[in-house]
Amino acid sequence: MAPKKIIQYIAPFSIFIIILLFIYDIWSHGTVDHPGKAGYVANCSQCHGENGEGIKSLVPPLNHSDFAIKNLDSIPCWLKFGLNHPITVGDTLYDQPMYPGNLDEVQISNIINYMNDEYFNLDKHVSPQWVSDRLKGCK
Ligand code: HEC
């Protein structure tokens, strides 16, 4: 077989391999963890749970939390300065304190975006700037 003929067979095959590598690359990068996930697991999941389910009547759930969705603008203040008054999430009353945290604007925005995607079903992306603007208004 002449070398030219061999190339004719190899070329389409290599294109096929390149396409496969491409698909694999997109697939593997598409499953990389959300940037806010590590922050959530390290700072929130011990109370709110790996899946935002909360703890019985002690810690409210984040998953589909009507309260959090309605008060999204206040979340930066809660995370920075704590939250300590009776609240109703779903139809349960919660009244345990959430203590102030030690997170910066970047970490808070990543965690809020993680919750928007995972728990709140909100098609909203917040920036560190959005977080610092909200922090200026904390009472
Ligand atoms: C020590 C346990 C604890 C940790 C850690 C904690 N929380 Fe909370 N969180 C609570 C409790 C308890 C409440 C209810 C506070 C109240 O009733 O005033 C609450 C309330 C909330 C609420 C409002 C209620 C709801 O379920 O929608 C949000 C949102 C929230 N936490 C998010 C977070 C995020 C995000 C983190 C991590 C950065 C975090 N919490 C870390 C215990 C905790």
Image (spheres, rainbow, N blue to C red):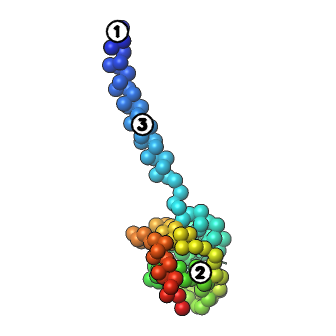
- The residue labelled by disc 2 is 80
Q: Can residue 9 be seen in this view?
A: yes
6 left or right, relative to 68:
left
Instruction: Compare marks 2 and 1 and give the one earlier in the sequence.
Output: 1
Mark 2–mark 3 Cα distance, whole angstroms, equals: 46 Å
Residue placed most toward the observer, 10 or 139: 139
How dense is the environment of label 1, judged by Cα within 10 Å: few (below 14), some, or many (20 and up)? few
How dense is the environment of label 3, judged by Cα within 10 Å: few (below 14), some, or many (20 and up)? few
Residue located at (58% from left, 73% from top): 104
Disc 2 residue type (three-letter): Lys
Q: Where is residue 37 in the image (x, y as percent from the top left)?
A: 56, 63
Q: Which mark identifies residue 74?
A: none
Instruction: Compare marks 3 and 1 and give the one earlier in the sequence.
Output: 1
Q: Quadrant of the C terminus?
A: bottom right
Quadrant in the rendering for residue 105: bottom right
Q: Which SS class for mark 2?
A: helix
- What number of labels is visible? 3
Q: Which mark identifies residue 2?
A: 1
Q: In this view, does 45 lie above or below 13?
A: below
Residue placed most toward the observer, 51 or 135: 135
Q: Where is residue 83 in the image (x, y as percent from the top left)?
A: 60, 86
Q: Tell me which image quadrant ligand 1 sits in.
A: bottom right
Viewer-nearest of discs 3 and 1: 1
Mark 2–mark 1 Cα distance, whole angstroms, equals: 73 Å
Q: Position of residue 11 (x, y in %)?
A: 35, 24
Q: Which SS class for mark 3?
A: helix
Disc 3 residue type (three-letter): Leu
Q: Which mark identifies residue 20?
A: 3
